[in-house]
Amino acid sequence: MAAKKATRSAKPGGNGANLGFEATLWLAADKLRSNMDASEYKHVVLGLIFLKYISDAFEEMHARLLTEQGEGAEPENPDEYVAANVFWVPQEARWAFLQASAKQPKIGKLVDDAMVAIERDNPSLKGVLPKDYARPALDKQRLGELIDLVGTIGLGDKENRTKDILGRVYEYFLGQFASAEGKKGGQFYTPRCVVRTLVEVLGPYKGRVFDPCCGSGGMFVQSEKFVEEHGGRIGDIAVYGQESNPTTWRLCKMNLAIRGIDGDLGKEHADSFRRDLHKDLKADFVLANPPFNDSDWGGDRLQDDVRWAYGAPPKGNANFAWVQHFVHHLAPNGRAGFVLANGSMSSNQSGEGEIRKSLIEKDLVECMVALPGQLFYSTQIPVCLWFLSRKKPLHCAGKTLFIDARKLGRMIDRVHRELTDEDIGRIAGTFHAWRQGKKYEDVAGFCKSAATAEIVEHGHVLTPGRYVGAAEVEEDDEPFEEKMRRLVGELNEQFAESRKLEKAIRSNLEGLGYGG
């Protein structure tokens, strides 16, 4: 499944909030959800999108083989597809067959049978696909309508019909389901703008990329996009991941397959602390968004673990267990970028301060970024980005870059914010200028390159606000008397408007019989 460069129809914005047809599709699909819980409906919809994707890719290859029959090609030979890295889709699982049967009462069983057949003929998908479409609780008429809706994806856009269009829809729907599920949704989805910031700063052009808490695979998808957009090939990076939640592990497998990414996620889901599936892996890049402040991580059984090279993490909080797990898996020149709760930058509880001090003294902390609030669907906890490096450039040795990005971003709805392309470019551009030693300057209120000695003076606290200082205030040349007259005038206008509103409200209340 050779990757094609994604076409960009999205409007500017880190999360791709205004994507046009994806949003229209979502509204139509959500209308068919009825009373079904979002966490349940997610598997119904994403399973069908995946089925449509592999069927489209198969049909594309099938049509090509038909034209090459005279040259010995066999359109109904599974080996032809395996050789081309395309999933073999048996007759009963092809989209055309299912869509023709969409109005039949037995459509749920037909979809289940299709999923079973695909897993049977494609060992890499064994145990991955949802197979619960025949259950009585799933309205078969709505299922048929949903199949018709998914059937419209990619039609009329032959050039990008399979991977690009369906991949974008899959990713957009993941984000929408995360939003619909609220806190629970954060277990499988990291906002795209946050992932893009990590990827743009780290720049994983080539090598092994590891995410030991990989959710639905967003870090891998964005890493592959980064490579392609910078002139590389999809095979330039090798993807390794691990996920403890079985449902999320399956979502990730489908997400990678729909993108044509061959990732090693282990043979099954597993807990990274208790059963590390990639024990000997030394990665060039670690990208991760671990669960924040996890108290139930089994730390009491892992106190003498070889991974705790910088101090035993507290049993009641996994933050610094994750940090040390990441460092443990870095190659000698490896670098890591990950999300943590803001408390990780300053906490001194249960030895966390000592671990942070050790990381700083070993000169592993390359950059700290404070992010604005309301970026995540799952939590209102303020978060930050950590960037660690096993081997900093010589001119960066003994220094750490601090970036305070709390004022960046824009609101995309009443409760969610996103970093725009310009915001991400500013953060990444500042970091690369500093790391490359070119045209970097401290900017009051935004960025500061601090020596380790200065960090020691601040008690090994890594909060960027401590270092960047306050932004310079623009000079105000408006004379005081003029400014006061203007402000008082504006205030009087607002008072008058307030009185008008009060009068209108009282009148409405009296009309309803609640005057007096």
Image (cartoon, rainbow, N blue to C red):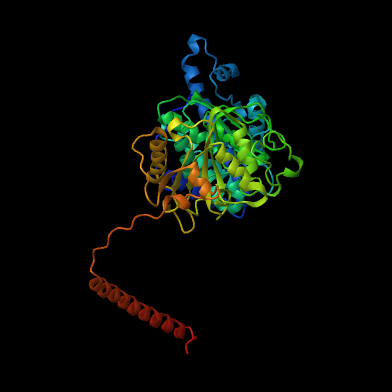
**Is 349 drawn above or below residue 336 in the view shown?**
below
The residue positioned farthest toward the top in the image shown: 71
Where residue 241 sits, quadrant-wise, is top right
**Is 143 drawn above or below residue 84 in the view shown?**
below
Residue 510 x/y as whole percent: 45, 86
Q: From this viewpoint, is residue 139 visible?
A: no
Where residue 88 sits, quadrant-wise, is top right
Q: How many marks?
A: 0
The residue positioned farthest toward the bottom in the image shown: 516
**Is 496 drawn above or below residue 304 in the view shown?**
below
Q: From this viewpoint, is residue 490 visible?
A: yes
Residue 223 x/y as whole percent: 49, 33
Residue in front for this viewpoint, 350 or 383: 350
Where residue 356 sits, quadrant-wise, is top right
Residue in front for this viewpoint, 408 or 482: 482
Residue 283 x/y as whole percent: 57, 28
**Is 391 drawn above or below residue 456 in the view shown?**
above
Residue 96 x/y as whole percent: 54, 32
Left-right relation of 359 to 113: left
